[in-house]
Amino acid sequence: MDSPVIPDDLLLEIFLRLPTPADLIRASAACVSFRRLVADRSFLRCFRKLHAPPLLGFLDQRGFNPAIPPHPSAPAASAVALAADFSFTFLPSPASHWSVRDVRDGRVLLDRPRRYGGGEGGGALFEEIVVCDPLYQQYHTRRMEFSIAERPLGVRGFHSSANMAIMEVGEGMTGIFVLLHGLNEHDTFSPSAHDRFCLRYTIQQRISGGNSTQWQMAKAISMASPYSFIGSIGRHLLLYQCGTSSIKAGCFTLDVKTFKLERVCASGPMLKTHAYCNFPPSILSSPTVSKW
């Protein structure tokens, strides 16, 4: 007896629930009909909406620092490092004048001074801004509008030199993570506690029955060695460790739900570093900006 044919709509639901992009790529290689379903643009939009692109490494002015083994994104990061142009030679020349300002979903925001007067000594009047896709080497410089997010109010009790990161922690709540150095057993700063490091996690919660919010301490974690914040993405904090006798220098992620620390890549001290997340070159990746 022949096996019953699985309807396409049921197959699509199964494919949407595959846990990783790599699993989807392997499924699409099984047969022509699977490939046809997976390569459909509407299906790929749904899959990308449900599955955030993986963290592949970090991007700064020196270039791309890909994830390395044993990080699960290492193979994809290696493929992107070979395929993408992180020197931005496809942008209006000279490419060396462009500075990376932010990275989101495979797109990179850069700027450079726009000169006036056409002669020597002309100062920078405005910043020229461009959004580009280094994987597909496309960009646009259309008019863009930006908004500025104010720092949350009501935060008290943090040392002025604290290393701070702000991120959404789910259910519409904002979390503040503060790396503190030199706290003694009374939770105050002391020169004798120079080798103690702590991560404080505070959540902004809405007061029951009203529209106001308040900050509440959620967790305090002792850290074995000093880290500094690079930023945050999804449910992960991005940290840099300068290296100790027991830990190699590099970039790490910290899952704010499980507080699992995972090494991503090895690199020297980096300023203005940005996490790069994208799908590797495959049917899942597509240009994120159009040529201008």
Image (cartoon, rainbow, N blue to C red):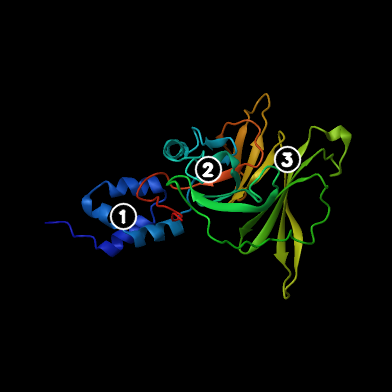
Instruction: Give the residue drawn at x 56%, y 61%.
Output: 143
Instruction: Please indicate whether residue 26 sits to the left or right of residue 232 in the image.
Output: left
Where does the N terminus fall, quadrant-wise? Answer: bottom left
Q: Please tell me whether mark 2 sits on a helix, a strand or a loop.
A: loop
Q: Which residue is denoted by mark 2 in the rendering?
A: 93
Please, what is the three-letter code of the amino acid marked with disc 2? Ser
Residue 101: x percent and y percent? 62, 48
Q: Residue at x 44, y 46 (%)?
A: 137
Q: Residues within 10 Å of mark 3 (few under 14, many from 20)?
A: few
Horizontally, residue 242 falls left or right of residue 81, namely right
Q: Position of residue 178 (x, y in %)?
A: 74, 47
Residue 39 marker? 1
Report crowding for label 1: few under 14, some 14 to 19, many 20 or more residues within 10 A (C-alpha): some
Q: Secondary structure at mark 1?
A: loop
**What residue did someone put label 3 on?**
222
Instruction: Name which residue type carries label 1.
Output: Ala
